[in-house]
Image (cartoon, grey):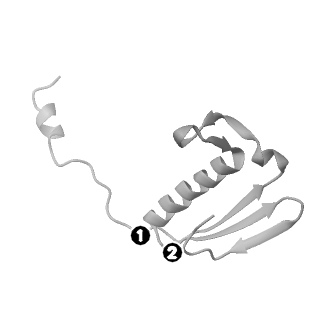
Amino acid sequence: MEAGSHAERSGPPYSLPPFRLQSEDILFCIDIDAESSVEMKVSGVKGRPITRLDSIRQSLLLFVNSKLTMNSDHRFAFAVLGQSVSWVRDIFPFSL
């Protein structure tokens, strides 16, 4: 290691300049069928069984909350496929 290289690296830490993230329109297409109510091998809080639909719901909540934390102008829509198709949009506040 060169003597001057440590001094060169001890400057200010790397940082990103602030910028505004563009608003996004995000569409979720979820296939809900009889298998979505099947319990998974793992259990949830207090040993409560978790279904596939529970894990999909939790994933959506985490994703949407993190996207809204980055930019509150993101818009979300949901298309659900089952016995019939349903379309939901403009969900604020977000809840499943």
The vertical placement of 47 against 31, above or below, is: above
Residue wearing tag 2: 73
- Is 37 located above or below residue 9 in the figure? below
Which quarter of the rendering shows the C terminus? bottom right
Identify the residue at the far right of this view.
83
Question: Residue pushed farthest top?
Answer: 1
Residue 61, percent across and down? Answer: 56, 58
| Amino acid on which the number 2 mark rests in the picture | Asp
Q: For the point 63% across and 54% down, which residue is it?
A: 57
Q: Where is residue 63 drawn, in percent x and y? A: 55, 56
Disc number at residue 74? none
- Mark 1 to mark 2: distance in Å? 11 Å
Between 33 and 73, the residue placed more toward the observer is: 33
Rendering quarter of residue 43: top right
Q: Residue at x 62, y 34 (%)?
A: 42
Disc 2 secondary structure class: loop
When asked about the image quadrant of residue 80, the answer is bottom right
Q: State which quadrant residue 25 falls in.
A: bottom right
Q: Give residue 6's position: percent from left, percent from top.
A: 14, 32
Whether residues under marks 1 and 2 lie with C-beta atoms below 8 angstroms apart, the answer is no
Dot 1 amino acid type: Arg
Q: Depth check: 15 or 3 in front?
A: 15
The number of callouts visible is: 2
Q: Establish if 75 lies above or below 49.
A: below
Query: Can you say which quadrant of the picture contains the N terminus?
Result: top left
In the picture, measured across the screen, residue 23 lies left or right of residue 16, that is: right
Residue carrying label 1 = 20
